């Protein structure tokens, strides 16, 4: 008989997920039940959002540095950059060709009224 697979152990991430859901529900309940009290809590929420904004730039910087540092050879970085630039150029070229084709003819013409008030 094959051994039964046990369910995966719950990690701290699962508990964090539940805590975030509980906080969202609690915030909604407080906002609906006691809006005046919820307004008094606004500085705490603003400070939290400011702290998150403050962390975004260093996280992005570290992600980019670690991504570049993990590449074994600099040629791979250059090749990836050249491929990205080529894809961007190809997309721009294709969109510039498709843009006028998708636009109905004459739609950019704006009637300019003559000095007498009738369109020219």
Image: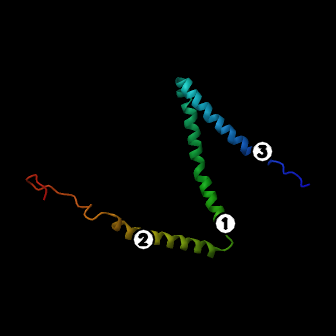
Farthest residue, direction front? 1
Q: Secondary structure at mark 3?
A: loop
Chain-order first, disc 2 or disc 1: 1
Number of residues whose C-alpha sits closer than 10 Å to that of mark 2, classed few (under 14), some (14–19) or many (20 or more): few
User: Looking at the figure, which quarter contains the N terminus?
Assistant: bottom right
42 relative to 93 in the view: left or right: right
**Residue depicted at 72% across the width and 45% down the height:** 13
Q: Which residue is mark 2?
A: 94
Q: Is residue 50 left or right of residue 117?
A: right
The local secondary structure at tag 1 comes to helix
Residue 40 showing in the rendered view: no
Q: Position of residue 119 (x, y in %)?
A: 13, 56
Check the image and report above or below for 75 versus 66.
below
- Identify residue for label 1: 69
Q: Residue at x 57, y 35 (%)?
A: 45
Report how far apart the C-alphas of labels 3 and 2 lie in the structure: 49 Å
Nearest to viewer (mark 2 / mark 1): 2
Residue 38, image x and y in percent? 55, 27
Decide which of 17, 4 is in the foreground and name it: 4
Q: CA distance from mark 2 to mark 1?
A: 34 Å
Cα–Cα span, label 3 and label 1: 33 Å
Q: Which residue is mark 3?
A: 10
């Amino acid at each position: 008989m094959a051994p039964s697979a046990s369910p995966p152990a719950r990690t701290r991430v699962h508990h964090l997920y539940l805590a975030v859901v509980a906080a969202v529900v609690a915030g909604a309940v407080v906002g609906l039940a006691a809006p005046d009290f919820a307004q008094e809590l606004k500085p705490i929420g603003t400070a939290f959002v400011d702290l998150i904004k403050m962390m975004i730039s260093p996280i992005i910087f570290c992600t980019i540095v670690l991504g570049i540092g993990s590449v074994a050879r600099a040629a791979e970085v250059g090749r990836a950059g050249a491929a990205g630039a080529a894809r961007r150029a190809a997309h721009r070229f294709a969109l510039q060709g498709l843009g006028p084709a998708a636009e109905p003819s004459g739609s950019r013409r704006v009637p300019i009224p003559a000095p007498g008030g009738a369109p020219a």
